[in-house]
Every structure is written in C-alpha cells, then in structure tokens.
Amino acid sequence: MVSIPHIGSSLVRATLAIHEPPLGEGSTTPGALMKTFKFEYNPAQLQLSRRAQWGVTPVKAERKGPTPEFMGVEPTEMSLEIFLDRSDDPDSNDVMKMVESLLLCLEVTSTSIAANKPSPPWVVFQWGSFSTARFTAYVSSLSSTYSLFGTSGMPIRAAVQLQLTEIPSRTAGQNPTSGALTGQRVHRVVAGDSLQSLAWREYGDANAWRTIAEANGIDNPAHVFPGTQLILPAASEVRG
C-alpha cells in the first residue's frame, strides 16, 4: 500500500493523463495529451504484480521431470480502484460521464487510425513524486460497479476497477556518451528547476516545455515541485 503524499498542507491528488499513442516507429513516449483525469478521492491502495515465464518440455527419459527454462519477464501490472460520488447532487450525470471518459481508454483513437497505426490511448498514472506510483501504461481492463442511483435512475456513485499494464522505457539502451538524445530519460526535479529551464538544457529550446508538460500530464507548468520525477521525451519527439 502506498501512503498518501502531501506538499505543504495540501493533499496531492492522483491523476491519470490520457495520451494519444506514439506514432513514431518503436517510440515508448506517449503522444499528445488528450485529457487529464483528476481523482476526487485518492486510491486506498495500489497493487503491483509481475510474472516470469518459464517453459517446460516433457522428456520421456526424465523420471523426475525436465529442468524448466526461463523464457522472459512479463510487464508490470498495476490494479487500482477509482471512486466516483455525486450523492450530494441526485440529478447529476457526472458519474456516467466520467465512466464513459475512462472507457475511451480501451477504444482506438481517430488520430492513430488516420496515421494507419490504430491503437487505444496510452496513459500515465501519477501520484505525487514517488516513482512507485508513476506508471506509463495501457489500460488492459476496466470494470465499473454502480452502487447508488438518483430518483431518475441516473447512477450517482460508482467504483471503477482499473488494470494498467506497463509500457517499459527503452532508456537502458541509450548511449550516455554519444551526446545525442535518442531515447527518453527520467529527471528528478531539484530546487530552481522549471519546465522552461529543463527544455533549454535538454533541447536548446525553452519553448519545448510544452512537450515535457504533455508527456507528464501537467496542466500548470508552475506546479512542478522538487522531488517530482519527469519523463524527458527524446529530442526527435520534441515540438517547440
């Protein structure tokens, strides 16, 4: 279970940034930001799981069974619950609209269809500055349970079970001495950092801060605090 982070006296809310899938070949950086879903109630817990694949080929002569062979590791998965409530406004249709917006994470985007690379959105889940609670992924499953209804039958309370499957970064293969930014990397914000200064230092263009903001689901560039981990997209994906 991940504890609730605070900045000063303000509760830090979890967010789910919904992005276009990347259109570049082999890119592991999310595309343009479509929508940022802000949690009204932080998750009570986050469940992380990962599985290793082992293969076994039966051998007739082996009485005790064959030796298993390691086949690889599957991506990390995160499970969480999103709680939605409008019980104070029985005529509201907000809960229905929020569930519908989350369901769009499982549908192919029109932009990717136009580019002949059909794909549902990519998402970035973030909760404070903890790397444990920062997750670039696709939505592998979603289920919604409505538990309270208004007098007209409109749902005004729901619990949405979300399963995210990680999309691993390929930064490990980047040559740090080449001088070229061929892949994304992660930067931990320190005092004095701003999106503009990071964009100038990384890409030589302060206007490229918008690309960093989109990659991290940031609405307000002034709300970047020390300790936050930011994805810095590859130079080839920067839009000034």
Image: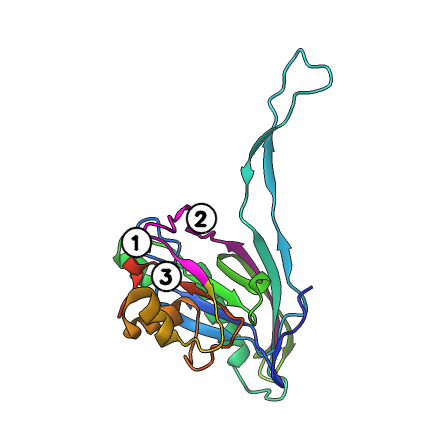
The residue identified by callout 2 is: 172
From which residue to which does the magenta span run? 157-186
Disc 3 on helix, strand or loop?
loop
Residue at x 51%, y 54% (from the top left corner): 166
The residue nearer to you, when weighing 31 against 115, is 31
Q: Which of marks 2 and 1 is in front?
A: 2
Q: Where is residue 218 in the image (x, y as percent from the top left)?
A: 43, 74
Instruction: Decide which of tag 3 and tag 2 comes sooner along the chain.
Output: 2
The residue identified by callout 3 is: 233
Residue at x 61%, y 73% (from the top left corner): 158
Q: Is residue 40 above or below residue 199?
A: below
Residues at marks 2 and 1, CA–CA distance in whole angstroms = 19 Å
**Amino acid under disc 3:** Pro
Q: Position of residue 226 (x, y in %)?
A: 52, 75
**Amino acid under disc 2:** Ala
**Amino acid under disc 1:** Gly
Quarter of the figure with the N terminus: bottom right
The residue nearer to you, when weighing 66 against 145, is 66
Q: Residues within 10 Å of mark 2 (few under 14, many from 20)?
A: few
Q: Where is residue 136 in the image (x, y as percent from the top left)?
A: 48, 59
Disc 1 on helix, strand or loop?
loop
Q: Which of marks 3 and 1 is in front?
A: 3
The residue nearer to you, when weighing 136 against 92, is 136
Residue 202 within the magenta-colored segment of the rendering = no
Instruction: Decide which of tag 3 and tag 1 comes sooner along the chain.
Output: 1
The residue identified by callout 1 is: 24
The residue nearer to you, when weighing 170 against 39, is 170
**Image position of 27 (left or right of 135):** left
Residues at marks 3 and 1, CA–CA distance in whole angstroms = 12 Å
C-beta proximity under 8 Å, tags 3 and 2: no
Q: Is residue 175 above or below residue 43?
A: above
Residue 172 within the magenta-colored segment of the rendering = yes
